[in-house]
Image: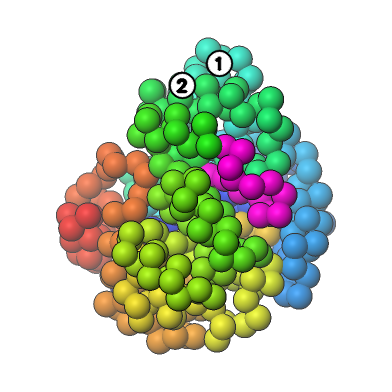
Amino acid sequence: MVHEAVPKIELHCHLIGTLNAELLRRLETTGEQLLADPERLRPVGFEEGPQGFADWLVRVEHYKSADWRRYLPVLDQHMATLCRQGVVYAEMMISPTMFSRDLAEMVDQFAEFRERATACERGQVQVEFLFLIPRSLPDDLIDKDIARCVALAETGGICGISIAGLERDRPVTRFMRMFDALKDCGLGIEIHAGELGGPDEVAEALDVGRADRIGHGIAAFQDDRLIERLREENVHIEFCPTSNLKMGAVRDMACHPVGRARDLAMNFSINTDDPGAFDCDMASEFALVEQAFGFSKRDFAAIARNSMASRFAKKLRYPDSTYGCAAPDRPEVARVLTEC
């Protein structure tokens, strides 16, 4: 398929969402103690929607409270998978609760986490991290998380934050002082909006959240004026096709706005969201849009360029043809990176 000839960049993936039965079984063979039963870790089915995803989260409940050391072997396995699929750059959302609440201890722990994560890259795929801030975060924790994000921004630990959760939970206006503080630190802001809510949530993410990127953004395509604004302001949209199908954000692929976004030359990427939960990977997501909308090699190259230009981490560790495990056979890698 034509998408196999261009590098892939992923900007929307939750680390906990990479867990699946196959990955856990591989970890088990290395002697790693598992916190979830691979025999019970079935993915979310079609038609199950948000409740199906909530049930999946119950099956990985113990990983929700696990610390950063537990995630290193998970991250290593997932990064090997990214390399096999031709992914050259990825940003992943992780929970601040993986680290100590003490600010100094957190900075030290994250430094070790970052060092070990870089070793897992094997010089083939660059992985950066965003702190995931739930919309339901209690008010008394907002200032504490601001301090944590600022501390890691100063050390280069994280490149941005992501506001996630059901839009009906809480408005993003609660986080205005966080957005102001983090913008001043140069951190990128990604907001999940327009997945199960309406176009108003997308507009709020832009007006109040000062979002650099919109996660999902499906509902934006119900409003022509909002589409035009996204185009004019060159806001990046992170599409997650299989997730959008299984969560009920779209009825079928024919209804997915990714084809329209391509036709309008909008700025967007293709991502997995939670590949373990939704039983997908970057190769299958790219194949899905290619089959549904006839994306060409030129289309995928434009997606790669737009995705790289919209990344939050500006420094590239592998900016030449050493990027990617098949770089000698894929000169597009170096060209895409050079143009970005």
Range shown magenta: 162-175
Q: Amino acid at mark 1?
A: Leu
Colour pattern: rainbow
Quadrant in the picture for residue 156: top left
Of callouts 1 and 2, the N-terminal one: 1
Q: Decide if residue 161 is in sight here.
A: yes
Q: Nearer the viewer, residue 65 or 209?
A: 209
Compared across the picture, whether 32 is left or right of 212 comes to right
Residue drawn at x 49%, y 28% is 149
Residue 99, relative to residue 226: is it above or below?
A: above
Residue 139, relative to residue 235: is it above or below?
A: above
Under tag 1, what secondary structure?
A: helix
Quadrant in the picture for residue 137: top right
Q: Position of residue 294 (x, y in %)?
A: 40, 87
* Residue indicated by mark 2: 151
Q: Position of residue 205 (x, y in %)?
A: 51, 52
Q: Mark number for residue 103?
A: 1
Q: Is residue 114 magenta?
A: no
Residue drawn at x 24%, y 50% is 322
Under tag 2, what secondary structure?
A: helix
